[in-house]
Image (tube, rainbow, N blue to C red):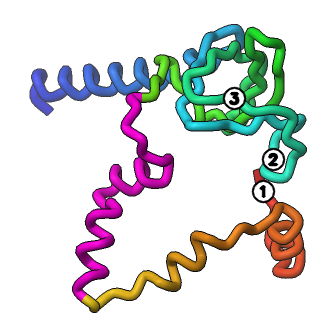
């Protein structure tokens, strides 16, 4: 491998390692993080079915108390402390731009699918969204979900 290519390869590997270490450091104990989701349930333990003890909202500031990979224990200035999913937080403050988009609309728009596109596709008569709309209206409780997982012998997971 020519010297330039070898040097470039090691430089790229170095920057990848630095970026990875920054991500790990960002969620280290004592670091400040910001809520990057519309709302985040604060739980008494890690896991999907853990009891919710409070809620953080977009832009709230927290301090990391523990890091367990996908789950963090964080504490707010108001004293609310509990387990939260790590991917709901950012090292930069996230602010509401006032766009009026719901979290679902924002996620779909990021994938290139918006309500306008749904309307256009639906108006052609080729696609019927009534089944999808019915599923979106259905609200499933934790108890129903837990029963489904147990009956199907599926792992509850974290």
What is the magenta segment's predominant secondary structure?
helix
Magenta stretch holds residue 104: yes
- Mark 2 or 1: in front is 2
In-front residue for pair 15/8:
15
Task: Decide: few, some or many residues near mark 3? Use Cα within 10 Å; few <14, some 14-19, many ≥20.
Answer: many
- Vertical comparison of 129 with 55: above or below: below
Kindly check if marks 2 and 1 are in contact, taking CB atoms under 8 A apart as contact.
yes
The magenta span reads 97-124
Identify the image quadrant of residue 153. bottom right
- Mark 3 or 1: in front is 3
Q: Which mark is residue 157?
A: 1
Q: Quadrant of the N terminus?
A: top left
**Residue that mark 3 sits on:** 56
For this orientation, the residue located farthest to the bottom is 126
Q: Which mark is residue 47?
A: 2
3 or 2: tag closer to the N-terminus: 2
Q: Residue at x 37, y 37 (%)?
A: 99
């Amino acid at each position: 491998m020519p010297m330039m290519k070898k040097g470039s390869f090691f430089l790229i590997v170095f920057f990848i390692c630095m970026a990875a270490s920054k991500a790990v450091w960002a969620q280290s104990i004592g670091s400040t993080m910001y809520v990057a989701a519309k709302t985040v349930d604060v739980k008494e333990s890690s896991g999907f079915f853990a009891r919710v003890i409070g809620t953080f909202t977009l832009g709230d500031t927290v301090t990391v108390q523990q890091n367990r990979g996908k789950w963090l224990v964080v504490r707010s200035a108001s004293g609310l402390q509990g387990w939260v999913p790590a991917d709901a937080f950012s090292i930069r403050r996230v602010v509401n731009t006032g766009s009026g988009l719901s979290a679902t609309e924002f996620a779909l728009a990021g994938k290139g699918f918006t309500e306008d596109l749904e309307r256009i596709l639906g108006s052609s008569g080729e696609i019927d969204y009534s089944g999808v709309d019915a599923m979106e209206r259905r609200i499933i409780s934790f108890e129903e979900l837990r029963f489904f997982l147990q009956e199907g012998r599926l792992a509850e997971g974290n």
